[in-house]
Structures are given as C-alpha cells and as structure tokens.
Image (spheres, rainbow, N blue to C red):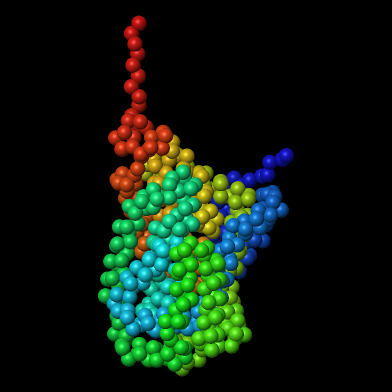
Amino acid sequence: MEKTKKANLWQSIAIVTVVLLMMIIPMTQGASLVIPLFIIWPVLYVFMIVFKFDYKKAENDAFNNLRKIMGTLMIVSSVGILVGAWIVSGTIPALMYYGLQIINPQFFLPTTLILTSIMSMATGTSYGSAASVGIAMMGIGSAMGLDPGMTAGAVICGALFGDKMSPLSDTTNVCPAVTGGTLFGHIKSMLWTMIPAYLITIIIFVVLGLKTDISGYSSESINTIINVIQANFNISIIALFPVISVIVLLVLRVDTLPAIFMGAISGLIIAVVFQGVNFINVLDVMVKGFSISSGNSLVDKLFNRGGLISMATTFFMILYSIVMSGMLESIGVIDALMGGFTKKVNTVFKLIVTTMITSYTSNILTCSGNAAHVITGEMLSPLYKEKGIAPEVCSRTMEDCATLGGALVPWVNGVYFSGVLGVSILQYAPYLFLTYLTPIFTLIFAATGIAIFYVDRKGNRITKEEHAKLYIEPPVITVESA
C-alpha cells in the first residue's frame, strides 16, 4: 500500500501561518470567527491540491474527528436550553434575588471565585459551574454595577481551579493516564503550582473589589431591581430546585450531559407548575430564549437571553474548529510542528519548557484540551521516564498550560465561556490571573528544582541525590590488574 504523503516542516509552517492569520485578523476587529473558520475549509483544500495531499482522506479524518466532541456540542446546545428554562422558571431570578441581598459588593469578586471553585471541585466540571453559579454571579455583578469582564474572570478562574483539583474531572483523569502517573499523585503534584497561584489570585480579586468604584451602588437601586424581579417572578426556595438538582446529580457523578438535561426538564416543570407559564410557551423559550419588558433596562438585559438559538455561534465555532484540526492532523501538520520541540532536550528545565510549548501549541492546533493532553503526554512522557523525572511533573505541566490556557483561545474553551457568560474573551482575558500565574510558578520550580520529583528506572520515587547518582554521574569503572 502506498504511504499517504504528509506535510513537511516548512509546508506545515505555511499552512498554520495562513490559518492563524485568518482567525486572528477578524478577531482583532471584533468579528465573529464562525465564517473565517468556515472559509478555512476551502483554503485547506487549495493547500492540499497544491502540495498533493490526499484530500478525501483528510475530509474523512475530519468527520471522524467530530465524534470526539459530539458530547461537547450536545452540552453547548443543552446549556442554551437550560438557561432559557432556568430564567422562565424563576431559578436564575431567584438566585439573583437572594444574592443581591446577602453579598457585599466589595467582596463580591473573591466570593465569586470561591463559590465557583467549590462548585467545580464538587462536580468535576468547569462548564457546569459556569453555566449555573457563574450565570447567577454575572447577573448579580451587573446589578451591582461591576465590570462584567472582571466578574467573568473570577467565575472562570474559580471554575478552572475547582475542575483541576477535582478527581471527577475529565482532564484530571486523562493527564495521569497518558503519562503513566496516578490520579491522586497528579492532584498532589498540581497543588505545588496551583495553590500559590490561587492564593495570589484571591488577593488580587480582594484588592480589585476594595478599589472598585461602587459610588454608583446604592441600596435603593438594588431594591428597585429586587422589586422588579419579585414583580415578574414567583420567588421562593422552590424556584431553586433545578439548580440544586443539577448540583446533586453532578456530585453523585451523573454525567454532565444527562445532569444538564434533567436540570432543564426540572426548570420546565417549575415554570409550568410554580410560575404558571403555558407549557408551549416554555418550550418556545427553551428554543428562542426568554423575553421580558419589565420597565427596568438592566433587568431586561439580564434576563432577555438563553435558548437553543443563543448557543448557535458557539456550536458552529466548535464544529468548524474540530473539522479544521482533523484535517491538519490528517495531513501531518501537527506532527511536523510538534516533533521539532523534542530535539536537544537535555535538562529538566528544557524538558518542562518543551512540555509547556507543546501543550499550548497542540491546544491551539487541535482545538481541544484533552487532545492536547494526549498528544503532549504520548510525545513527551517517554523523555520524562528516560531522564528519571516523575510522570506527575509532566501531567501537572500539561494541566498548567493546556487546561488553563484553553479559556484564552476562542476556538477551544474561550468560545464556551464567552457564550455562556455573555462577555467577549477580550473583556475577561485581563482578569484570568490564575491562567497567567500558574505557568509562572511552573517555570520557577523548573528553574530552581522545587517540586521536581524523581523516580528510578522502576518508577519508584527517589531523592534528588539518588537521581543524580543514577542518571547524571557516570558510573565508576574499575579495571582489575592482570
């Protein structure tokens, strides 16, 4: 059988340069990335004709690649349905109603960070916590007059921290699996880089909260919003049942998608039974989103959202991104670019930096955090083993970069967080302190040797001194005299 032609390094650089420019230029002008991502398909087709790659195989591989993210696409569309159901059921209005009465605006940001951290840690999903607690906190923050980008930053930082620290998270299980480590060894290793970064992030949000101008905040304006909510919805603990049910289901390790489905259905039931909304009207809201004219512009802005259609942009961005990455992987672009990073890695520092670069690059090219983890783990874990570095160091570095960095990439996790929270990536990017601080600690520890763990050739943990004798110092050769 004839071997399929693959892209060389220079062809790969040319293709990726064009692809990135096609995405970055429209993004800097504030345009949606859906159409640029759609146009990339025929552009890649032209490249394949010019370089004589097998287009039919690339197309088939791209469609097969879609299977990897069908669950994500279902979650994205389901979240739109859930948000619509939770507004018409009074669930999100009730969360805002109670939150506005008990949360101090000056400590709102760290409170948001901690609440979403707990939610993600308990459920193992940053998507779920952003779509439930996160949406409620965005509404409360807007009512308090806080910068929505700042609030979104606190939501995402908390959601990602809890997701990484949770043994229920998919990435937290994937990373040690592909590197040969253990789940709880991986979590313990992440504590070294995550905890100092998280504590500093909390401090920054406390300072931001204290320095934020809340002169426009008044109990009178908040009471007006509370009264408008109360006038348009039946507010009671019953309205909170849908969000409580989702949290319970996720804690019980029910998969994210069924939990969201059940949350949406419970919202539908509460809307019909408790809010007195016609069943057909609730179904319409779940598709088209909620609409209200309360006489208060802020309340209308907060609640006129949700529905399946609201997630269309996010849905198609993910769809076209994965098709693009499937084609790039099929013609060998990713392998050609990634392979060059592993050359001349002869120190622990270089190995960790190479892991960081590979994680970020593969995340951008594959449009998937888990795909980036698999590529990085399979490519570099043999080097860690060869040099006697514990696999938990590799898996930790992968999470520090690909998992956290995905929130900054529009075609990875950024499109989801932006769509659910209703703010652009450019708005929340300045406040993703956890995303920037964690890799800094990764580099500091790589340079100083702090939290670098060593193993012998059988995988048993050893000291740095034992490692030096086993892997670095040349063996003493004695020659017996004749």
Residue at left offset 55%, top offset 67%: 258
User: Toward the viewer: 445 or 30?
Assistant: 445
| Residue 160 in view in this figure | no
Along the viewing direction, whichever of 2 and 128 lies nearer the viewer:
128
| The one of 340 and 417 positioned closer to us in this rendering | 417
Q: Quadrant of the C terminus?
A: top left
Q: Can residue 277 be spotted in the picture?
A: yes
Please tell me whether residue 302 is drawn above or below residue 478 in the rendered image. Answer: below
Task: Look at the picture and state if 101 lies above or below 75.
Answer: below
Task: Write the residue at 32% across / 85% down.
Answer: 217
Image coordinates of residue 18 in percent, x first then y, are 57, 58
Which residue appears at 46% of the width and 74% of the height? Answer: 243
**Left or right, residue 219 beside residue 81:** left
The answer to whether 448 appears left or right of 88 in the picture is: left
Q: Residue at position x 34%, y 11% from top?
A: 480
Give coordinates of residue 2: x percent, y percent: 72, 40
- Depth check, front residue: 52 or 309: 309
